[in-house]
Image (spheres, helix red, strand yellow):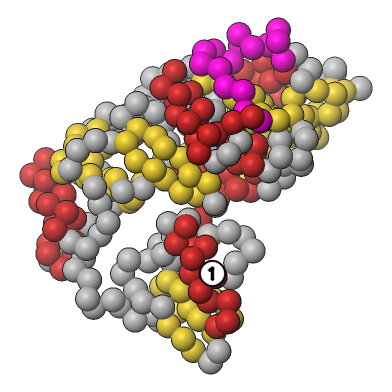
Amino acid sequence: MPVPCVRVERERGETMRQRLDAADLLSETHDIAVDDGWLYIPVRDPDAVPTDVTVVEYDAPIRDTQTMPTDLLGFEPTYERLGDVVIIDEDDPERARTIADAIMDSDVRAATVVNKESKIKGEERVRDWSVLAGDGTETVHREYGAEFLLDLATVYFSPRLATERHRVIEQVVPGEHAFDMFAGVGPYAVPMAMHGAEVVATDINADAIEYLRENARRNGVEDRVTAYAGDVRDRVVEYENWADRLVMNLPHSADQFVDTAVELASDEAVVHFYDIQHEDDPYGPGERAIRTAAEPEYDVAIETRHEVRTYAPHEVNVVLDVRLTRR
Ligand SMILES: C[S@@+](CC[C@H](N)C(=O)[O-])C[C@H]1O[C@@H](n2cnc3c(N)ncnc32)[C@H](O)[C@@H]1O
């Protein structure tokens, strides 16, 4: 059966394999294939592969030396990985335990298996987990050449947003002022600094800010990242008219912070505004909220309307890239 593979000229194969390995993208289930001068390198998550790399569907050979959870269970469990933590989402505790044991007994790289025990909740957007195998929920996640230490039990993190984060980070220009208003452990803030921005990051979750500072250090950009634990609204006085770029990744409630974003914005700023809305009008509420806050002081130009992912039936997670130009 065809699987997503990075296709690369044979002579560039090893460099590419190492690059994909560093980003934790190599498939655990299929082997690399050679065909007509091309190398086909199977990948775990095609959406997380950098955009300068070609991904195709190719019938790569199944790695038969590996024992997968399916081999032990007789059915295919659904799971995702974050660093060396494997995440499952099972309602039945017995089935969850069986799957966790099979994952640990298989060749899947896993230090811990956790089950989702609640939805993402509260101001800090953290969920409850049960640890079914291994111990500890702290792990290192790699994404587009950056690494992030985080503890799933105390901070928000979603590896599914890697492609979207990369889309934003690629727009960063060296020397610009970037303000990440809801920064978490820094998956926008740290790579923006790696792209040469001066970054200010805030989060109301003090644990997330501790990890963000550590992640800035790990990725060699601590001198370009200033991080504050607390409500972003408390930073307005200090950073009024400062930001050339604002990241607002707090879907569901970002509209309550557009006034703050406008106060932080410089004379020419881009706002990346994330929202979750009904599919019938996913962009309208965000656009109206931004226009109400910014006009007539600024000209408001919507540069991108982009669907990030489906969130729930009939609900979509979207982003608006909005340019504010002071009149
Ligand atoms: C959806 S998470 C996004 C985190 C990060 N940007 C990411 O992509 O992983 C939203 C974050 O906003 C933080 N937050 C919520 N209200 C806040 C506020 N008033 N000021 C600053 N941060 C806030 C939460 O603690 C949480 O870490």
Q: What is the tally of numbered marks visible in this picture?
A: 1
Residue drawn at (71%, 35%), measured in percent from left and top? 197
- 254 falls in the magenta region: no
Nearest the eye: 108 or 315: 108
Residue that appears at 44% across and 18% down? 206
Q: Amino acid at mark 1?
A: Met
Give me the residue at 27% from left, 29% from top: 128
| Quadrant, the C terminus | top right
279 or 317: nearer the viewer:
317
Along the line of sight, the residue nearer the viewer: 270 or 310: 270
Residue 230: image location, x then y, percent: 52, 13
**Residue position marked by numbered label 1 in the rendering:** 16
Query: Is residue 229 visible in the rendered structure shown here?
Result: yes
Could you tell me residue 209's position as x and y percent?
A: 48, 23
**Over which residues does the magenta segment extend?**
224-239
Tell whether position 228 is magenta. yes
Residue name at image x 22 percent, y 63 percent: 107
Quadrant location of residue 303?
A: top right
- Above or below — where is 206 with respect to 300? above
Task: Please state if 82 lies on the left or on the right of 235 as rendered.
Answer: left
